[in-house]
Amino acid sequence: MPRSSTYEAVLDASLFTPAQLQPTAVGRLAFQAGTRWMRDHVCSHRTLVHEHRVGFVLWSWQLEYVHPLRFLDADEARVEVTARVRGPRASQLEVEMTLEGPSGVAVRTRAASVPLRLSGDEALSGAPRPLPDALAGAFHDDETERTPHRSRIRAMRAGFARDGEQLASGRTHFRVHRHHCEVADQWYWAETLGFAAGAREELVMRHGKALPGLRRALAAPLRRVDVTWLRAGQFRDLFEVRTTAHQVGDELAFVHELWLADDEGGIGSGIEDGGPYAVVVERI
């Protein structure tokens, strides 16, 4: 049976919106959970980076809201996390977390990361490499799968275009400051969930009067968030979030593309051809 780590997370008001756990808060809890599983069963994050010179870059993440959990519902929640290596030659690390409250599992997340061989500089620069045998061997047989994890973003977007109606679009700008970053001055991936949520709220405030159905996106809880990260943003980068809202049956779906923006003719010049840095899909 795959190994798990289980522990209690103390809840406080900063983790919640009026409707549910904030996506950014769930991202932070999920990252901490994966780090804890690695420490419990393989090695600590510090040892991984400093001694093995191995890092992980998150590529795909899914968040599913299952049962309601609000601030007044509980003082703590039960976290359970498992991990496995996937793909040929251990080319991916997949981590799954559940957060359980009084009504059962409140959220479920799945993250797929790509291992990097780090160069040893302070920027934690690295290139994709399969997990070294010494680390891959720490995973049990039932924690290893040869088929790779695949992102669902492209298929979801095709479904919105085929079956849905585009309601509105807009652009919002965010700069990456140090409180959005991790130790190497790259953006901390969970903060991009906040950029997307902010862009959604801006779009609703701009178009909600003309499109009353959009206003539900400010009050109703999210059902699911899917993300893929294609490149990492850096400290002081200015990003443009390009958002489109779709009506798909009874569901609202928001697609956010995070592009590096021109910054007074400097940062971002000529980046347009490189494609977005991340794509976030929120469904309500």
Image (cartoon, rainbow, N blue to C red):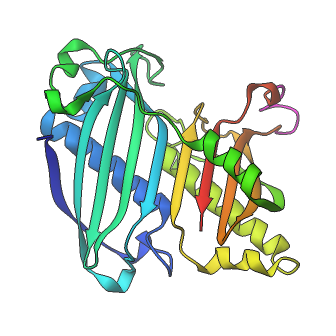
Kindly indicate the quadrant of the structure image that contains residue 131.
top left
Task: Indicate the quadrant containing the N terminus: top left, top right, bottom left or bottom right.
Answer: top left
Res 42 seen here? no
Query: Does the magenta run of residues contain 264?
Result: yes
Where is residue 12 shown, x and y percent of the image?
34, 75
Where is residue 201 shown, x and y percent of the image?
70, 69
The image shows residue 231, relative to residue 248, as above or below, that is above
Image-based side of 11 in relation to 211, left or right: left
Residue drawn at x 51%, y 66% as measured from the top left: 223
The image shows residue 218, relative to residue 64, as above or below, that is below
Judged from this view, the residue extending furthest toward the bottom is 72
Image-based side of 179 in relation to 41, left or right: right
Residue drawn at x 31%, y 72% as measured from the top left: 11
Magenta-drawn segment: 263-270
Residue drawn at x 26%, y 68% as measured from the top left: 100
Count of numbered labels shown in the rendering? 0
Query: Does the magenta run of residues contain 33?
Result: no
Where is residue 183 shown, x and y percent of the image?
43, 37
Kindly indicate the quadrant of the structure image that contains residue 244.
bottom right
The image shows residue 4, relative to residue 124, as above or below, that is below
Image-based side of 142 in relation to 201, left or right: left
Judged from this view, the residue extending furthest toward the left is 1
Task: Indicate the quadrant containing the C terminus: top left, top right, bottom left or bottom right.
Answer: bottom right
Res 225 seen here? yes
The image shows residue 163, relative to residue 56, as above or below, that is below
Residue drawn at x 32%, y 15% as measured from the top left: 89
Where is residue 233 shown, x and y percent of the image?
61, 36
Image-based side of 109 in relation to 77, left or right: right
Q: Main secondary structure of the magenta part?
A: loop
